[in-house]
Image (cartoon, rainbow, N blue to C red):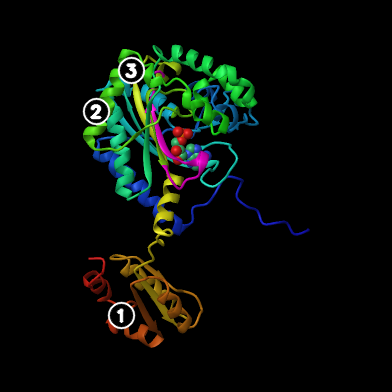
Amino acid sequence: MPPTAPLRAARGMRDLLPDALSTWREVLGAAREEALRYGYREIEVPMLEQAALVERGVGGDTDVVQKEIYRIRPTAEGGSTPLVLRPEATAGVVRAYFEGRLNQGPQPVRLWTAGPMFRHDRPQAGRFRQFQQFDVEVIGDAGPAFDAEVIELTWGWYRALGLGGLSLELNSIGDAACRPAYLRRLRDYFRPHAVRLGPDDRHRLETNPLRLLDSKDPVLVELREAAPRITDALCPECAAHWAQLRALLDAAGIPYRLNPHLVRGLDYYTRTVWEYQHQSLGGAQNSLGGGGRYDGLAETLGYPPTPAVGFAGGLDRTVLMLDEQRGGPRPAAPPALLLLPDGDGLDLAAAGLARAARQVTSVAADYSRRSLRAKMRGAGGSGARWAAIFDDGEARRRVVQLRDLDSGEQREVGWDELPALLMTSPGGPA
Ligand code: AMP
């Protein structure tokens, strides 16, 4: 057989190795803590959904649905319902809210979830085909105080992590009452310039002209400066919502920047939209997370009209930015105690002693056949707190030499005393 190249992860997929995972755990832990502090309850929804849920929820004309959906082929037995890997969680959470009858209890319902999402886009720095999001949703109330609460919660999450360089961009994109007239004005404004646009943007001009406002095309970046602004064209209800939201954010002391070109990429948003951008995330990938109100989504999915607001924060980019700010991830915590048997035939003794010490702290035994010198060298660089060394004679006397790897101090300790001693040592597990 000819040698084959080693198999690698699929394109756009990546592993999170132990050292990298320490920041992940921290970021997810802070998300959970913040959500609980605001009384949000955790929910899990499947990674596979019916294609129709995503197509109708996210919107058939969005890039996500047009280009980025992973479609699941029917199985050999012939499953007939087309399924997709979820590209985002909101549509699934709204479906679960109704299917699980959460709509029949006290309203609104505050929920959070976190997990992997899938989009088949061209991979690049900060863009992966499997990535994770922290999601927060408030379903069942139209009041602007809930928009402000979700913003405050998510702003608090980034602040708890100590992440700097963040800006909060805010806009309102109106609703079914005022947006259609605005879209007509927007088309009228851009149409005379259609020849200067690429084919995708010419198509968007007819199907989804809001997206022209956040295009990266320099022609559009220039043209949009003089485009009509939706915040000048809001109906009285949307204008009141918009004013109250800003008053609430001002009172909370949350700094934001009004960005008339922020429209977000998913079709279901109404009124409030916002995005957290990070200065050192380049170009199209500068969004760390975003959210908005989606009062029309439930109806689009075939459920009674139900107002809601939510947020999706990318964990991958948040971890990336935190690690960059700190000069790299903090290494994963090593075991506190290393057991270093010196010589052959000591596996049983080492395993037993490790088992006893594990009652009070984390322990790894070095069962390798390396010399004690090599084992000590490894222990010294491991970050462990202690090493317990013993040879055949010491095993017979049931003692170890317990070495403090920071100070280098060493003393003989009986096996039976070891757990209690580890427990009460300064810097120990007690
Ligand atoms: P969206 O659901 O498109 O509003 O995205 C919300 C957040 O998810 C973004 O701000 C990113 O942090 C993250 N995100 C979206 N797509 C990707 C991707 N392909 N790779 C990594 N993170 C992503």
Above or below, 332 against 250 in this view is below
Disc 1 target residue = 407
Q: Compare marks 2 and 3 and give the one earlier in the sequence.
A: 3
Above or below, 292 against 27 in this view is above
Q: Which residues are magenta?
A: 278-296
Is there a contact, CB below 8 Å, between mark 2 and mark 1? no
Residue 116, visible in the rendered structure: no
For the C terminus, give its image quadrant.
bottom left
Quarter holding residue 403: bottom left
Bin the neighbour count of mark 2 within 10 Å (Cα to Cα): few under 14, some 14-19, many 20 and up. Answer: some
**Which amino acid does the dot numbered 1 rest on?**
Ser
Disc 3 target residue = 238
Residue 425, visible in the rendered structure: yes
Query: Residue 369's x, y, as percent?
Result: 51, 78
Label 1 SS: loop
**Which amino acid does the dot numbered 3 rest on?**
Cys
Which-is-in-front pick, marks 2 and 1? 2
Disc 2 target residue = 247
Label 3 SS: helix
